[in-house]
Image: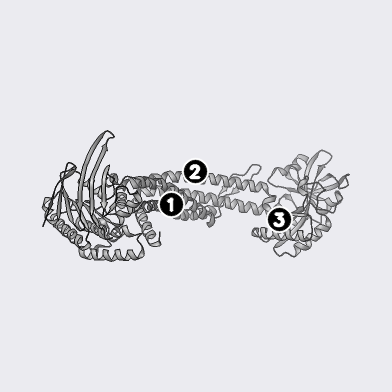
Amino acid sequence: MSAKPMYKLAKLSGLNVLRNKRRSILTIIIIIVSFSVLSVFAGYINSQRTSWREIMIHNDYGHIQIFNKDYFEDDNTSLEHVISQAEFEAVSDILNNIKNIQYFTPRLNISGLIGNENSTKIFIGSARSSTEEEKLFYFSPVKDGEYLTDEQPYGILVGFKLSERLKVNIGDQVMIMANSSQGSIEAIQARIIGLLRTYSPLDEMAVHLRLEDVQDLILTKSYHNIVLLLDSYDSITEIKEILELQFARHKLPLVVKDFEQNATFFVQVVEMYESYFNISLIVLSILIIFSLINTIFMSITDRTKEFSTMKTIGINNRTIFVSIIFEGIFIALIGIVFGLILAYFLQIGINSFNLTLPPPPGSEERIPFMTVFDLLINLKIAGFFIFTAILASIFPAYSVIKMNILKGLHND
Amino acid sequence: MNILIKDLHKSYQINNKIKQIVLKGLNLEIKQGEFCAIIGPSGSGKTTLLNLLGCIDRPDAGRIYFDQQEITELREKQLIQIRRNKIGYIFQFFNLIPTLTALENAQMPFWYARNKEHSKFNDNLSRLYKEIGIDDLKSRYPKQLSGGQQQRVAIARALANFPEFVLADEPTGNLDSVNTKEIMELMKQESKSLKASFLVATHDFSLLNYFDKVITLKDGVIDSISLNN
């Protein structure tokens, strides 16, 4: 079909939609509301995904982490498969020459016992450089006190719930015991300089320690992983590829994992949100399908004589079919355009009112209800709605094709 | 186009029980360029015959030939081609598409014609609009036109693609006497100019003088055929 008749057909369909204003309006309103709801929902997911992703990247995960290639075969505190000092230095040379890398830092995992004269508890520790607070963190995980500092050797931070369980506070001395790389049990006397809040069950077991202190304690110069902060999230794929190439070239037995590979819980939460979104999309699409079928059916019932006339004068079934499909698309397009406008201003409104949602379990702070308007997501919703409209128009269009010409001609 | 009808039968089922026989072995010939009327009481089968000849219904038995081509056994796709390329249809109630302008209504049947044919049809349409006297009404919508003007547009639509056979079902049934006279003269004139055969169903005996041939139907068969000099 060439452009000219297509344009005329589109015009005919458009005018038919406008001709049945009252009938079309109800469906258009349903599409506007559905579109706006989905757009705001998508904007909320987008906002949550982006903000939580950045918080997690900057407070713990980094954009990329480097591990010994066999690291994941053992538990994460095993000293079997670690990054040696020599490997770390080789990696550092590579990382220092990549301009998209803003910061990198090694870490060491540790677990053992923490206690004082009153009680002893199991802890899960992370040995870190004191520079992380300045270079990595968006929001400090420190609830009270201060973060690790080289000025306070053997200064540690404990999860605020762990401090409650141990009945200790900032300034108190605690004993830390762990298995060394030699198999012996070693202990150090540490002083609590801060309390951590991780917004997770780890608050009952988490301990942050200085990297050097832990290396002394467990008699190793190795690391479990190296955390990289890049200039942006979009650089991950490129940098990951470069690192994999470099490690292969230098025969370094290391693997590179990106944020989504490390933060599996985050990915699962995002997928859960996205499945809610998809379910909403399907439910609203079904609503639109039924509404559109009803609107178009009522419209074509009124116009059976017109369709019969068109068939009588030699207009083929395909043309009539396409004209009805166009009507569905027109209704959807009108709804989408107004829905897009409404969604845009709705999201501006939501963001300017500083609305909040109830706090998640284990937290007392309400979550800000923010949305990020993403044109691409809105275009995807629009595309899905147009597909829905086409789907909804097929059945009425098919019934017109099958309609008896004579019955239609005598229908007033 | 020469039209030949042989032993045409058509019946309709009413309420799935009663079978109403409308045409009972009708035979008829219409020669190229003939301007024919078909008359007869209600229920005599005029509209049924027009529907069968217009390829919008199929007979129970019998044959219809357009020139040498037998059309009763053709597939729907081929019938659409015939309806579009060879037949013009004029309705009593004009049957214009209300969302299209007068010009678009007449252009619609050849929206999908090839470019060369398109310009040929458009030229013919321009001529028709001038001759019919609706050239200044092209951009108006049907509701902005009088009954006579609407029927003129419908005639232009029926004749735009040089039909060889034009069927008109009570084309003046909804018009006043002045418009009736004008429409009849117009159809007669176009019949000559296009050399198209016309078959016009009418109840109005005062119009019979316009026709070359008057066919009277009675009880589903031809009762008489009279020729006007």
| Residue A332 badge | 1
- Residue lying furthest top: B17
Crowd band around label 1 with a 10 angstrom C-alpha radius: few (<14), some (14–19), many (20+): many
| Residue A64 badge | 3
* Residues at discs 1 and 2 in contact (Cβ within 8 Å): no
| Residue A283 badge | 2
Q: What is the three-letter code of the residue carrying label 2?
A: Val
Query: Can residue A153 be seen?
Result: no
Disc nearer the start of the sequence (3/1) = 3
Cα distance in 3D space between marks 2 and 3: 38 Å
* Badge 2: chain ID: A
Crowd band around label 3 with a 10 angstrom C-alpha radius: few (<14), some (14–19), many (20+): many
Disc nearer the start of the sequence (2/3) = 3
Pick the quarter of the image with the N terminus of chain A.
bottom left
Where residue B12 appears, as percent x and y from the top left, is 26, 39
* Badge 3: chain ID: A
